[in-house]
Image (cartoon, helix red, strand yellow):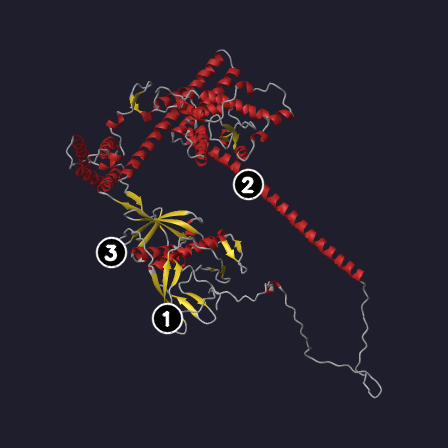
Amino acid sequence: MSKHDSEYNSPEPERRAVRVPIQDVNQTENEDQEVVDEDQNITFNVYTSTDMILQEENIADATSQANRYEINPHGSETKIMSSSEVGNSTATVKILLMPDRHMITVAFTIGLTILDLKNHFAFELRVPSDNIQITLDEKCVDDDQTLMDIGVQPHGMVQFELSSLDPENYPIRQIKPQQEYNMPDVITVRVQTDTYQDVVVEIERATRGKAFLGGYRHKVTKAKYHHAAVQTIAKKRPDRGIEMFSRDTQTVMLRNQDQQCSKNASTQMTSIGCYVSNMEDKLITPSGIYMTADEYHSKRLKAVVTLQTYLRRWLAKSFTDGLRQAKELHLAWLENEKRRKKEEKEQGIRDKYRRWMNPERKADFDLLYNALKKWRQEEEERINAAFSGAEKKAALCALLEQETQFISSIERHKTAAFERNQDKAVLAFLNKCAEPKKWRAFDGKVTQMDTQFTIRGSELRDLYNSITQDEVTKDERLDVVLTIKHTVKDHKCKLTQEIVDLIDREVDLLMRGMKKKNMDGLRKRISTLFLQYIKTPEFNPQVSKLLQYPADLRKNMYLCSGCNEYKSSSDFALKTNTSVVGLCRRCTQLDNEGRRREDFCLYKNILKHLRETEAKCSPESKITYLLQEQDLRYLVDELWGAQSALSGCKDLHDLLLVRWEKNSAWSPWNCILLTKDEAATHLKVENIRKAYDVVVIRDVKQKHALARKYFSQIPAVAKWQHDAKVQPPALGNLLVSKPITKATEQNG
């Protein structure tokens, strides 16, 4: 009898009706249950669909019981932790059948592959597994991947989408729930003895619960088997009339056995009547010195001490080497950090010098005007200190004239940069009109498609690039202008008629041998009108999605108090505390260049870093996106004095605004201005009261109170003050009115 079978003692078989409770049928894991007796083998072979269903339910119950308990050979229950076997854990798998979007929920082992899941649903849906496609988050899942590889945790949940690769021949249909099946009242069981005979078994629908009778687990396969409860009374051992207690499994059996050497040996000595030659005898004497037990143990102790000495020396040397390597790594890191900071500072200086010499953007010209303002102030201070009277007036007049020349030079650079940027903007606009449609497929590949509108935009872009080129021959120029003429002739309007007339005039001048420099104005007019032709939606439908029509501009139009013109709301730069619409961007820029000459580049960098940091820490935070450069300038310059709150560093390139309480969202009343290194250390502090002195804490709280008072006038920011749990402290509590002692720090 193998270990896989359950052993029972059954009575003598005969052909009779047996009443079996319905919940006790097919409780074992094997479909063929063998009941072994001394005289016969009885095998129950029941192949009905009801038995299969009951078997699956009982296996699930047995598995849940086996996950909680392990049965030892003595019949006791030992609780085990099955969560360590992660691969055998199950997870809830939700399958969304496409395109009907029917949901199916099953329990699936996370150690099995997607191919096993396909085979399971191929049998349920009557669809070949090769035509089944399983996707996760619109991405196809490989067959060799398991649920563990995808990232499903034990007892977790995942949702897949199941679709057919050939929906016409193998469509995906909904799985109809199985109808309730009733167990028959009588079944026939074939019993195997010397011959086969049929036994009629009557099914009794008992209402009692199934009893857990224990079981065992196979040591090799780790399969768990549970005893089945039946109605048939088991055969008992005969009662001898004596109460017996056996401890055979716990008693050590002793056995004595004689041993015989494999080789016999004998000795012989000289005696009367026996002569033994001693010619080959050897006299052996001990060569060593006799050693007592105390001497032996003392020698062993000395050897152990020697070994421990060398071992401890090696351990100490290894420890010191580790400390030395850690010190060298730390010094190398400090050197790299020092070099990195130096390179960053030098790179910043080089970038600043490059922006001075080759300004391209608005921020570059703001930097120039800001540098001009600082230079003028330094020169005024020098003149006021060195001259007086008429000499002072003459020096100031010379300074004013020199400043005027600088402004004129800056404006020339600004005009040239504006023309270059305008050409780049036109080229980017034309490229966007000719850009094909793009979308990402389920497998991650990007697909591009050219429509009739994008093709039209591409043709017009190539014509515009050709007509704006300077270094072309006479024949190439004629070919380009005649192509444009045939292109615009298809549309009859005033714009196209004017383009055609100008092209005819240029062709006539080219045929007459007119010089190129004399036709620059005419060619400029042709390119400008052709660009206007490209921006017309009737001639280029693709631009309708990129241009803003006057009908849309009427919705948000405001009057600029500077230039007295109506402009769109996007042309106004509003501050956080602005209550009315004032100057437009252009007028604000002119006012800044003429009077204030402020540079907000450094404040933009601080605000950009703040938004990126808060987006990672708290994606729901919105207050950082309401603040503008002017508001951040007030926080940095007015409240914190444009210097670090701890070290007093005044280099704005190295300053950051970070949270004061790192567990609360950032706000003007929950921030502190520190350097980059100080900010990294500050964010690691767990308890601020233990890390900082009382004076520092009260100084920071005072600045927070001033920031709360300033931003409380802004409705968009004031609502965050009402939502905050922390109430603003009284101003009187922020002042140090008594000496600071150790007791004060402990109470604080």
Instruction: State left or right for residue 384 relative to residue 514.
Output: right
Residue type, mark 3 in image: Asn
Dot 1: element = strand
Residue 30, above or below 156: below
- Is the Cβ of the residue at disc 1 closer than 8 Å to that at disc 3? no
Q: Which residue is label 2 attached to?
A: 336
Towards the viewer: 241 or 640 = 241
Name the amino acid, label 1.
Gln
Q: Is residue 25 visible?
A: no
Residue 169: assigned label: 3
Residue 332 at x, y percent in the picture: 58, 42
Q: On the image, numbered disc 1 is attached to which residue?
A: 197
Closest to the observer, 590 or 284: 284
Q: Residue furthest front?
A: 241
Looking at the picture, tell me which residue is in the foreground, 349 or 569.
569
The numbered mark, 1 or 3, whose residue comes first in the sequence reads 3
Q: How far apart are the two marked residues, 2 and 1, measured between alpha carbons?
A: 90 Å
Q: Is residue 318 visible?
A: yes
Image coordinates of residue 201 in percent, x first then y, are 37, 63
Q: Nearer the viewer, mark 2 or mark 1?
A: 1
Q: Is 567 situated left or right of 619 in this image?
A: left
Q: CA distance from mark 2 to mark 3?
A: 66 Å
Under circle 2, the secondary element is helix
Q: Neighbour class for label 2 at 10 Å: few (<14), some, many (≥20)? A: few
Q: Secondary structure at mark 3?
A: loop
Real-space Cα separation, disc 1 to disc 3, in angstroms: 49 Å
Mark 1 nearby-residue class (10 Å; few <14, some 14–19, many ≥20): few
